[in-house]
Image (tube, grey):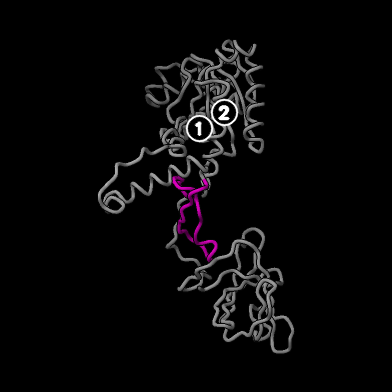
Amino acid sequence: MDRLVAVCSPELTEEGSRGEELRSFAAVLHGLGELCPWVEPIKLGLAVFPVRGPSRLLGGDHAVVAAVAMAMSAVQPAVVVQIGVAPGLFAAQLAARRGVVVAEQDLMEFLAPWPISVLGRPELASVLPRLGLRTLGQFAELHHREVFSRFGADAAVCLQVAQGKVGELSGLRDPSIGRRLRSLTARVSPLPNQPTFLGGMGLADERLHAVARRLQAQLGAESVMVGYDHGGRSPIDQASLVPFGSHPVPTNSTAPWPGKLPSPSPMTVFCDARAVELLGESGLPVVVDGSGLLNAAPVACALNGGSRRVVINWAGPWPLVEQWWETLHHRARLQLLIEPATAVLVAFEENSWWLEAVYD
């Protein structure tokens, strides 16, 4: 059983909506590749490589761990990385959690106190503790034939892992991680010239993908962004830009969103804060009171520090209370038609008005 160096980053185990975790993990793998050419990605946030060669070169297992830590601080200083060494993939990832180096003769002693749940088998984690078997050490004392006859072949493999005879369990690896990593840096070969513009409808998408991949290879992953629709109440919440080739977090854009504005949607949505001054007939600021109503009808408006403009018409406000299960987030939105025939969406939040979007 090979002794492996496991490098794990808990922050990168789940991919977010923009795919930044996958890109950070790719940077981690690149840094590890400078130390050892046999780095193997196991799943998002976890990679391993054999310790034997680097240990001989650097002067021991602890020296390898120190070199990995130094390399990670250089390529990804903001990412927390756990490093461990142990025989087999299963024990190596556990060693990374503790940040320890486990010798081959100490494997059983290291595995013994871990709870049954680390096997990732809910049925065993539910049944074995009721039988008084709460740790891998207690589980390892059972006979292979008894476990096989009662729980099946997979449980028998789990027993061998707990006994230190087998180094890996099924389900530890993500078979798609290699393909997803390759998609970040794939270089598409040029397509042959075609007699028609864009090569016809059959090759149009292929050509666009090829151009996008080449741009990303030259300028970085975020040089080509793709928009995705998803659920939300505000225009800025209903879409996001992710790098081409990334997989956004799936959301239900058709689910009911109480407080969502009706169609049509604004064309220009602002991500940065732009202050709005809204005045009533008396010249005093217009605000939304505790009942969700305006204290006065708006007659003048100044956008982002500009000159005051006459409000031709208005609709709303639409009060909105979000995240009521944590800290209440109160907001109200108002549609304004201002001179010269410009429709805008403004939001009242924290006693101030902010420009949210423009209906171009």
Q: Is residue 232 magenta?
A: yes
Residue at 63% x, 35% y is 76
Pick the residue in front: 150 or 212: 212
| Highlighted magenta segment, given as a residue range | 222-248
> Mark 2–mark 1 contact, CB under 8 Å?
yes
Q: Is 187 displayed left or right of 86 in the figure?
A: left
Q: Residue 309 shows which numbered tag?
A: none
Disc number for residue 125:
1
Q: Earlier in the sequence, mark 2 or mark 1?
A: 2
In the picture as drawn, the residue positioned furthest to the bottom comes out as 281
Residue 282: x and y in percent read 73, 89
Describe residue 306's horizontal placement relative to residue 249 as left or right: right
Mark 2 lies on residue: 115
Q: Would you place residue 337 above or below residue 238 in this image?
A: below
Q: Which residue occupies 42% across, 27% down? A: 170
Image position of 279 (left or right of 237): right
Distance (Cα) linking label 2 and label 1 = 8 Å
Label 2 Cα crowd, 10 Å radius (few <14 / some 14-19 / many 20+): some
Residue 59 location in percent, x, y?
65, 11
316 or 120, which lies in front? 316
Q: Is residue 146 magenta?
A: no
